[in-house]
Amino acid sequence: MFDVIIIGAGMAGLLCGARLAREGVKVLILDKKPQAGGTSSVFRRRGYAFPMGPLAFSHPDKVKTYLAEAGLSDDVRFRRDHFQLLAPGWDIVFSRPLRDIESELKLRFPAEARGLEGFFRELAGIIGLIKDLEDWHPDYMSPQPSEGKPDRETADRVERVRDAGRTPCLSVLDRHLSEQGLKNFLGTMGTSGPEMSWLNLGLMWRAMAEVGIWTPSGGVQSIVERLLEVFVAAGGEVRLMTPVERILVQAGRARGVRTETGQEFHSRWIVSNADVKRTFLELLDPAEVPEDFREAVQKRPYTGSELCVYLGLDPDGADFSRMRASHLFLTKTAGGRDRPGFEDFDGCEIEVCRWSELNPGLCPPGRESFVLRTGLPYDRFAPWRTGEKKRRPGYPGMKQALADSLLRTVESVLPGLSSDVEVREIATPLTYEDWGGRFQGSIAGWSWAPNEAAFSRKLLVETPVEGLLNVGLYASTELFLGGVPTALYTGRAAARLILRG
């Protein structure tokens, strides 16, 4: 009998487990994969180590606080990442203060100067409003605030944030600006049409321009490795390659889990580090979940998936001079995603990360490593899947053709990138689904589009099933601190709830 069973050894699950184990709680972590870390781990090929998921994250000071509470108290150093957009009519580094970006855009678009002033004034307002949401806004606080009516000023701030979450950012952009390319950039940091809410746009620009995006020394996976060490040293137990088939509920309360081999483990609390859709649509009997909550989980969409190509190469002869930041968002030609063929990426936005610049210790000396990513819908790949980690004949050739096409587009601005490739690996939405454990290959949490509230709160840590908690990227419907910090925040919140309860 355990006090707590955690499903999934992702970063949030490990932080929750470490925090509890250090308080003397008997914790068991089960994970279906052969290594801990979930999507924050790396895989290795011929001396190169490539990231399974996040490349960097925002709010490093909050991350350090959460890690210290879990027992990882030694200093974690961070290096700030920078981001560049390179597209027809655009070559701008935008990971810098908003006032600098506004000044540059006024020079580029003098006819839009007054509109830019109005937009950036509103943007500064929403950024000021959303600062430290988790400290005062009841939708983001966990544990939930005690009953009591907030003062008028706080109540007004709460409602303004909720209204921003329902407001399309495009409506704000249209109010101030006319030039579509300018609206696209300010609404996405790229060339796509703006689709997110005004709240999420404020969160995104605050993270990029004001707080910054940072890479920890040793890479994101180094945090996973150290959390695992703390957890085990405190007496926690980890069982890898042990997939959970069912969460067991008795008399309305989660009481344990059954693995795919039929083994049962029982506990007072269950913490799921699997995503919310998998937890409530696959691991629980439908009869154990309130119908309205289950319907909300079914209907509310996740973000989409992507094609990712990893490259390890000898850089001799390659020309990276047009890449002025560690992350380049590239669109070769105008026209967006209405491309004539599935294998044509010239009109798509592609993220190019010079991974070896961020993590030089994760590739052989004198070598370079790159990560190339672009969004592709899951339904294009679903017909190739015949079962978990099983594919129809022809799948490897299809992946290779996609990677070749993507690389040709990237080489239009980074010539010679593929001339001396030593390692090439390809991930599709099916990879993210089967090896990453992500529902339909989703990569960035719940949809960022404006919506009416499907759930009563933004945090989904506490669930309608007594004794069951969620942690991880999908345990919050808004990535209010960005991906990794929000996931860690939910792990911390779950540990606090258990210790209090």
Image (cartoon, rainbow, N blue to C red):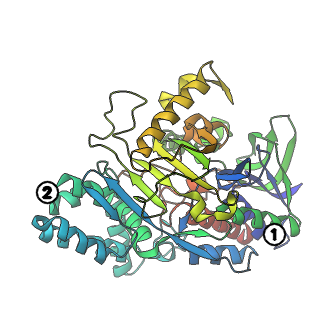
| Callout 2–callout 1 Cβ contact below 8 Å | no
Asked where in the image residue 271 lies, by quadrant, the reply is bottom right
Horizontal side of residue 245 vs 110, given as left or right: right
Q: How many marks?
A: 2
SS under mark 1: helix
Which residue is farthest top?
Answer: 393
The residue that mark 1 highlights is 230
Along the line of sight, the residue nearer the viewer: 94 or 124: 94
Residue 486, image x, y percentages: 56, 64
Say above or below: 49 vs 278.
Answer: below
Horizontal side of residue 320 vs 104, given as left or right: right
The residue that mark 2 highlights is 178
- Is residue 160 something one can see in this rendering? yes
| Residue 314: mark | none
Crowding at dot 1, Cα within 10 Å, few <14 / some 14-19 / many 20+, comes out as many
Whichever of callouts 2 and 1 sits on the residue coming sooner in the sequence is: 2
Which residue is farthest front?
Answer: 317
